[in-house]
Image (cartoon, rainbow, N blue to C red):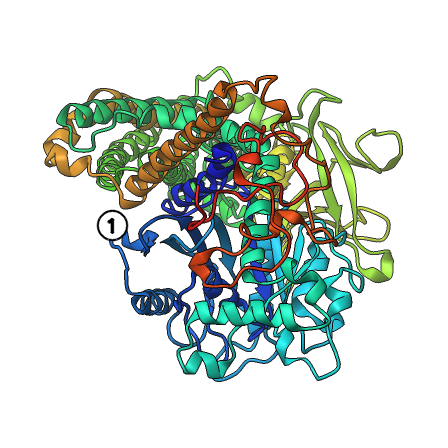
Amino acid sequence: MGNRGMEDLIPLINKLQDAFSSIGQSCNLDLPQIAVVGGQSAGKSSVLENFVGRDFLPRGSGIVTRRPLILQLVNNKAEYAEFLHCKGKKFVDFDEVRAEIESETDRITGSNKGISSIPINLRVYSPNVLNLTLIDLPGMTKVAVGDQPVDIEHQIRDMLLQFITKESCLILAVTPANTDLANSDALKIAKEVDPQGLRTIGVITKLDLMDEGTDAKDILENKLLPLRRGYIGVVNRSQKDIDGKKDIRAALAAERKFFLSHPGYRHMAERMGTPHLQKTLNQQLTNHIRDTLPGLRSKLQSQLLSLEKEVEEYKNFSPDDPTRKTKALLQMVQQFGVDFEKCIEGSGDQVDTNELSGGAKINRLFHERFPFELVKIVFDEKELRREISHAIKNVHGVRTGLFTPDLAFEVIVKKQIVKLKTPCLKCIDLVIQELINTVRQCTNKLSSYPRLREETERIVTTHVREREGKTKDQVLLLIDIELSYINTNHEDFIGFANAQQRNTAANKKRAIPNQVIRKGWLTINISIMKGGSKEYWFVLTAESLSWYKDEEEKEKKYMLPLDNLKIRDVEKGFMSTKHIFAIFNTEQRNVYKDLRQVELTCDSQEDVDSWKASFLRAGVYPEKDQNEDAAPADTFSMDPQLERQVETIRNLVDSYIGIINKTTRDLVPKTIMHLMINSAKDFIHSELLAYLYSSGDQNSLMEESQDQAQRRDEMLRMYHALKEALLIIGDISDYHNRRPTPTAAAAPSRPPAVRGPTPGPPMNPSPAFGAPLNPSPAFGAPPIPSRPGPPINAFNSHQDPFSAPPQIPSRPARVPPGVPR
């Protein structure tokens, strides 16, 4: 029966290839295989057809093979072919096989001679073949013809390299003998990926077309361009023979006759020809598979382990089971609620390191952006003093007042309080936008069920929009409450007595001296003529702004006191991506060197707003705000008494508005948290599920997306393919572990095998390929008149296939058909 274990190795790889090809991917496994490469019209197709003994490959001018063809030859009593994409359909007529290859090629690549790397899997069962798997690749070309893409040469080259770069791939380099071997496209690309020639098998075709008086003896004897696995010569049918439908068996007989009669090849005839090439490839692929099998097994196991966790939830998955749908709906809604709360509260499992989001961004809005918007409210000092003057005069009427009227103070304060509505409503809008973004982010996990995701987003967003109205009403109510009663007895209010003595500049509130408010990198924007822009490490304290060379703060470049400083916005320059703000001195003095203002640049507007908020804490205000110094007295005429009254009310307004700002900064975020954010969390936890049930049919809600269903099916197919592959490999191993041990009496039945290197046919004639073993009667070739080889039963059927290989070939992979047992 021969060595069944070795015989099973090639079908094993065939099964693996089928398993992974059926799921549309190779699972990142480099399966042992033989790739056929060569130039166009080098004779690749003829070699493959000679193996099968049938005409079944497309022929024509230009590029014919436009997709890789994985050709699996299986020795079998019946003769037929099967395609992986036509499961269950047997092709007995090989003309139909050719037509199917052409139509399947056109289906992917179209009819414009384009190429594709998606393989076609063809399995041929025949008594005329030995177990063998080859990949027929497109022939290399130099020039695009017809409507081929102009980069067709590079496309084909990239496809070839995709296959032959893998260490597990043997390269069958087909070169015609009537061209210079040094110009062989096949050997050139093979040498790029296999410089030592360890994986390359040379095939020389068209030996019968060489010029008279020349031969390829030096090449075939492996002397000219040596390869570890040597060269084998073949003679294919000519185009005239193909057009005349010459029988392949007759062609094989003519090939044998050519080698026996040619004076240059007569001495090596038993190592030339298609039958010998097929046996050699069978043996070399078998040995190659045997060598790579342990690594393949470990890689399969690691792939299976990595999939195990993901597949666990899909093992007993039934898409239409109502119980599963209900459970999945409950779990997903619950998980959505947990994720939303984590995003807001800041305890998420996956923390974004690229930008602020969720609760962190809302916190920044509350404590940096909102206070800054409050302070940014522009009070035109001249207009404010004019309004105070008019209010005082209108309160006194026709009389000249001796005292400062408190009614004028109330009128002016209320007018300023109304201006707080705009930044408060803006803060609510920004928080809503961030809440909606957070909802979208959390529904990403529901992408497996598009309808559920869409409904969840709609319901929660609608609830947030409903709460928006209530929150805005409540905030406006807070401002109306402030307008309803001006509390001049507030503990922080300065009162009339202090207001008369107060000087705005002297009373400017400062933070604790030397308190560090902020640190960070900023770029000072200076023209190239003055040295160009440079980045420094800035430190802002309650009294000064300093910048250093780096974060170690050892080399201080400058320290700028904060007295009389203000901030103003600066427009971005043309083509500039930086955001700019400037610091300047209100007394028109130089701020830094000879610069009246220092322009500072940040990467984003958020950084600019954050720095501005930090300067506010340090007492540096934007240009034109409520702390603007008094306008010159000559702007409009006032008598001294009215001027004192205006100054008093101005100071009182400053004090009271400061109290209102402080209250608003505290209460507005609390109102938003209570009425909007906490309400949204409660709604998601307690009411979202009920709304989802009432919004439509549960079955439509829980319909899987096509992508998810496809991903699940692919993952399950991959998982089962990996398990099946490991079982197949395990069966081979078990077979060898269970085989009987050779007895001592059996030892003399054959002489010890001469151990030699696996690759390459021997240079001397080998008796293993004499008659009757070499030519199979199925090929119709006459026997070689040389000494008979050892009888078949002389081979040790228990030789360990995983031990060092015998000299090629110690025995054929299986007894060729037609040899008497």
Q: Which residue is mark 1?
A: 88
Badge 1, how many Cα within 10 Å: few under 14, some, many 20+? few
Above or below — where is 783 with respect to 675?
A: below
Identify the residue at horizontal 47%, vertical 20% (top origin): 347
Quadrant that contains the N terminus: top left
Taking the view exactly as shown, the residue that stands out farthest to the right is: 555
Number of labels in the image equals: 1
From the viewer's perspective, tell me whether residue 154 is left or right of residue 534.
left
Q: Is residue 453 visible?
A: yes
From the viewer's perspective, tell me whether residue 486 is left or right of residue 156.
left
Would you identify the image quadrant in which residue 195 lies? bottom right
Question: Horizontal and vertical percent for residue 568?
Answer: 63, 49
Would you identify the image quadrant in which residue 821 lies? top left
Question: Horizontal and vertical percent for residue 459?
Answer: 22, 35
Q: Looking at the image, which is closer to me, 137 or 705?
A: 137
Above or below — where is 213 with respect to 90?
A: below
Q: Looking at the image, which is closer to me, 358 or 283?
A: 283
From the viewer's perspective, tell me whether residue 627 is left or right of residue 467.
right
Identify the residue at horizontal 43%, vertical 29% (top origin): 307
Q: Is residue 481 visible?
A: no
The amino acid type, in three-letter code, at marker 1 is Gly
Q: Secondary structure at mark 1?
A: loop
Identify the residue at horizontal 65%, vertical 27% (top origin): 507
Above or below — where is 162 with respect to 642?
A: below
Identify the residue at horizontal 77%, vertical 52% (top origin): 596
Question: Horizontal and vertical percent for residue 598?
Answer: 75, 49
Taking the view exactly as shown, the residue that stands out farthest to the top is: 491
Would you identify the image quadrant in which residue 570 lies? bottom right
Question: Horizontal and vertical percent for residue 179?
Answer: 69, 77
